Image: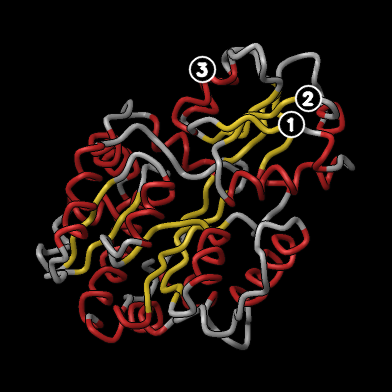
Amino acid sequence: MTSRSFPWRASVVALTLGLAACGEAPASLRVGANIWPGYGPLFVAESLGHYHAPRVQIFSFPNATDVMRAYRSRAIDVAAVTADEALALAQTDPEQRIILVCDASNGADMILAKPPVATVADLRGRTVAMEAGALGAYMLARALQAGGVKDSEVTVHSRGADTMHTGYDDSRVDAVVAFDPVATQILQRGARKIFDSSQIPGEILDVLVTRRSVIERQPANVQQLVDGWFLAVGFLKDNPAEAGRRVASRGRLPPDTYPAALRTIEIFDAPRNARFFTTAAGALPAQLRSLHDVMIEHKLLSAPVPLAPLPDGRFVTQAARRQPAGRP
């Protein structure tokens, strides 16, 4: 899977990075995300008024690389990232904490090939385009592993995820790592889907990550962020078309893009999130361990990462306790 990237508002990136450059102390909890459909509840919650500025502010970015850059520079306090990106962050900063599991990709991320390439095995000696970063490398590595192809047998061509549809037209490229809405455009060009995230269930998770120091300074704001997420998930389930319009408007996307994308994404409500963080069930720790081991094997991490401190479920547990029976 490639890093979560969509056409977005570059001016917001400049504004957010500018705040960090000025060295101003954060007046609120600043949350950064790009336009991956699984992050939609953040934008829905904002539009519904569940986040009251300046306590919680949502900043949008054109791609996952910019989100990671802003987070590392402390221009934002919370980042919406993939689980493998969270592990990459934790490798250099042990303060990282995962406070919510946003979603799982169940077919939304895919490898699309030009005919005559019909299987992953056919990628031997060919070129695959993907966005640079841990996630793109992870998706490709798992596909090659499933197809019995060595990493060294494939050439990687770096390209922005939001322009992958034009990357597919590049004569040098035989296949691309993509996700909706761009993937649909590529399929309409006659591409063949040779691998998708439904073949590695539970491995492609998106999470909210922050630092322990942020939690200590702003626990009430973090709780508002998490509570707002679950309120938005409830709204999305009851009003999918309206939720789609709100997300599409924020991202300047076609109105029907969001509901269509959700067919291959599972967004997690409060009870499911609480189970992820339950030690007895061990869902999140086990999945992080599996992901970690694959990343070590494929040299996507340079050294082992301590996993035990990463999950911090206090906020989703509190939110789940307040949910009315039968509601998300």
From the top left corner, tell me how far across and down residue 251 is, in percent: 28, 36
**Nearest the eye: 103 or 7:** 7
What is the quadrant of residue 151 in the picture?
A: top right
From the top left corner, tell me how far across and down residue 91 is, in percent: 56, 70
Q: Which residue is mark 2?
A: 126
Amino acid carrying label 3: it is Thr
Locate residue 320 relative to residue 42 in the image: left or right: right
Figure check: 272 above or below 306? above
Locate residue 96 relative to residue 159 in the image: left or right: left
Residue found at the very far right of the displayed protein:
148
Amino acid carrying label 1: it is Thr
What is the quadrant of residue 247 in the picture?
A: top left
- Is the image coloured rainbow, by chain, by secondary structure, or in one colour? secondary structure
Q: Residue at x 25, y 83 (%)?
A: 219
From the top left corner, tell me how far across and down residue 325 is, in percent: 37, 75
From the top left corner, tell me how far across and down residue 185 is, in percent: 51, 20
The numbered disc on residue 155 is 1
Q: Which residue is mark 3?
A: 166
Mark sitting earlier along the chain (3/1): 1
Mark sitting earlier along the chain (2/1): 2
Helix, strand or loop at disc 2?
loop
